[in-house]
Amino acid sequence: MSFGYQVLGFGGSGTAAVTGNPYGIFYNGYNAGGSGVSTSQLVSDSGVVSSDVAAVGTPRWAGGGTEYGGDKGIAAYGYEPAIGQSNLSNKISNTGVVASDTAGVGSARSSMGACRYGSGGTAIFAYGSGPVGMSNLVSSSGVVATDTSAVPGNTITQYPGAAEYGGDKGIFYGGGNGSKYNISHLVSTSGVIGSDVAGVGTARKALAGCDYDYDKAIMGYGTTGSLTNLSNLISNTGVVATDTTGVGTARSAVGACEYGNDKGIFGFGTTGSASGITNLVSNAGVIASDVAATGANRGAVMAASYG
């Protein structure tokens, strides 16, 4: 759900240019039979999703995934069928290779969001089952920190979408806690989550977000109680736009990440059972119609960009 950040020089405005990551990965989730899996699918720089890559790590679902270190990914937390809530993590190399489990740090939980923030390759996991409002920062070397307490005045949620925007900031949007929300929380360049920003768009949870066009973001899909295929664009200043009419199969528990440096992809999720559908996002933030499944169908996947 994030993109690499590299200083390419400064334009006349004095703003550093940014460039995205070329590849993406969908990892973990639950299959059509409801069992956890730890296989992955890689996304090429043209948005083609590969067949299944052999399983690595502990099967779990409903964790978070994000880029870190500029060109690598990390998937963490989630629900392990054998024990329940998890705080394991798995690093993803800049060639898309998933590493074995790293011992848990922070409170075990699932159903959180994750995104990159700052210009130094750092990332953040936040919210989750309980629900809880805590967050965990990730260093530029992929080390997950202990819990940071919830921000006062911040509505605690689970199943939010998360993405980067503006080149060095993050946003969590939507989610639920009994009720469904359309509020957002902005993440500063130092990883501090702000208080509630007034709601925009249709309140829903179990949606996903990714960046596009280098410095903008999009949130899509989810459930209001009924499955949706709505989306909301987010400007490079973190302003959430009203709903865009739905495209593709309505579903929840999707994953999303960047690919091709400036484009995005939504993938997998549940339509009532695990799905393998993907939808590409152009560098203008337009979601394309469904692409047929490649690899095993699954829901509640984790996703990140790399390369």
Image (cartoon, rainbow, N blue to C red):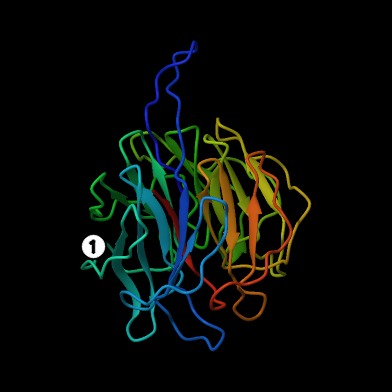
Front in this rendered view, residue 127 or 123: 123
**Residue shown at the point (41%, 58%) measured from the top left:** 65
Q: Is 24 situated left or right of 246 in this image?
A: left
Residue 221 visible within the image: yes
Graded by Cα atoms within 10 Å as few (under 14), some (14 to 19) or many (20 or more), the crowding at tag 1 reads: some
Q: Mark 1: which amino acid?
A: Val
Q: Position of residue 249 (x, y in %)?
A: 73, 66
Q: Quadrant of residue 285?
A: top right
Residue in the picture at 40% in, 35% down: 188
* Viewer can see residue 207: no
Determine whether the residue tagged by mark 1 lies in a helix, strand or loop: loop
In the picture, residue 21 is in which quadrant? top left
The quadrant where residue 263 appears? top right
Residue 15 appears at what percent x and percent y?
45, 19
How many numbered discs sit on the rendered protein?
1
Give coordinates of residue 165: x percent, y percent.
Answer: 51, 37
Query: Which residue appears farthest toward the bottom when viewing the image?
Result: 33
Identity of the residue furthest to the top in this view: 12
Residues 245 and 266: in front is 266
Q: Is residue 204 above or below residue 29?
A: above
Which residue carries the number 1 mark?
Answer: 105
Residue 91 image offset from top left, x and y in percent: 29, 60
